[in-house]
Image: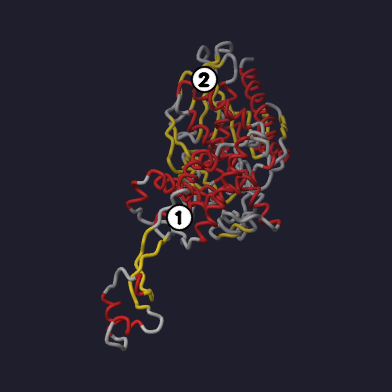
Amino acid sequence: MRLITRPWSAKSLGEGGAFGPNDCLLGEFQGQAPRGLEYATLLSGMVRNTPTGLALVPYPKRDHAVAPEREDFPVRPRFGHDPVTEAEKEGAAALQHMNEVLARIQELEEALEDPAMLWERLREAWQRAEDEADPRMAEIVRQARRMQPVLREIEKRVRRVLRRHRELTPLDRVQEMDRASMVWLSRQPGRSIPERAGASQRILATVRRENFDTLENRVLHAYARLAVDAARQWIREHPSAKSSARYGQVDAFRKSCRTLARTLADLGVAIAPAGITPNYVLMQDRSYREVHDCWLRLLLRRRTEDDLWAWQAETWTDFAVLAIILAIDELDEAELVAQSPISWNEEAAGGRWFDQDRPIAVFWLRDTNRIVEVQARPEKPGALLSVARSHVALRISDPSRTDLPRRVAVWTPHAMRRLDLDECVIEAASLLNQMQPLALTEVLRHGLIITPARGRPETTSVTRGKVAVRAIALGPSGNDLAQGFQAVRDFVQGEIHETSK
């Protein structure tokens, strides 16, 4: 497999080279798929009767990895650990960006509750995300709202059990003796029980003491500590939302969980490990059952973060596809005539939260009489998209004319550090120019690059003859989202106007 750092790049990484944080982790192969490497196939097509494919290599979970070599990457921060060093801060910023992208993707799940209003509801959610003072919904936000009264109720009646212990007890307070106590008594000198009790008048007897170290309280303790870490991470990622109601709820929930964890520690309650088998109380007591369910959800979030971190580029592609669909749907003349069923996954698989057929959406533009298809990871991309290494595209056609269909290549490059847009558009335009002799059954002259803004939203473009490429630095929230999404709108409108000539 030939390793490349950009989807439009003609240069390979070279033998002995290593991917760095400024690179897109891509590979191109011909013939059979490579073996012995961890990768995801983004595109699979035919070029001059030769099978070709575009593969994505995951980000390393440590600062380096082998096969292929990946070095100097930021490391995902430890859960509940505040960043201190520059490397940790870079990793925290990357994690925050990942979580914001996930939030935009997961808002699709809520919008799917009303399929007829799917894109309108998703657009409203994204518009709210443009205001950083109105922070994103997350699992810890939902739990802060739901679990605060539940924890208050449990604090009033923390379950306890009476456990038997043997200890020296005054004679007048002895209520129960077991076999070991009687053996002990029989070995003491004396002819009567008072004589055997000695000067202290105490004998070994069985007593019952309150004990709070039960399985359900261990789960409660583990949940409280985990919720504190999750809430602290969410608060750290939203410093500009201190005046919002969500921020206040999460902060109050964090303080309540911290107090509860200290109380349980003082009572001698241990921390339950992950994977315990729930007992009767955890299954039948309503409050403890909710604690157990929420604990499992937070544990699942931690386990899936490794997978999401590794496959952020796949999640970014889904985010870019949704942005394009929303931009087309906003056109006054656009009418959604076909939409592939969207299947939401309970867990992210390879960084992807939903699956859909191809194309994901088809629009009819009434005034210009055009059909626009949004294609994501097409099963049969054709020679042009295969050579362009573009696994997202727009297909624009006029049903009333016999003109060749026109495609727009959409690249969604993702790297841990911001890409140079000027360099990107020049290289992508050069590739499109070289491809033109292959354009026999379709037209592909324009391209769009959507890449993470990383705090610097920007738009740039280049034109080389009939070839034009525009690059947009887009973000998942705040000003990065507002400016970047407006640039996507402008591009879509310009492409429609171009095809109407």
Q: Left or right of 171: which side holds 102?
A: right
Residue drawn at (68%, 53%) of the image: 89
Q: Quadrant of residue 196?
A: bottom left
165 left or right, relative to 155: left
Left or right of 482: which side holds 136? left
Q: Which residue is mark 2?
A: 363
Q: Position of residue 307 (x, y in %)?
A: 50, 50
Amino acid under disc 1: Arg
Point out the tag, 1 or 2, that comes first from the N-terminus: 1
Label 1 sits on residue: 35
- Disc ID at residue 375: none
**Front tag of 1 and 2:** 2
- Image quadrant containing the C terminus: top right
Amino acid type, label 2: Phe
Between the C-alphas of marks 1 and 2, the distance is 40 Å
Mark 1 residue element:
loop
Residue 81 figure quarter: bottom right
Which of these two is toward me, 460 or 232? 232
Residue toward you, 286 or 308: 286
Q: List x then y, in percent, for residue 304.
A: 49, 49
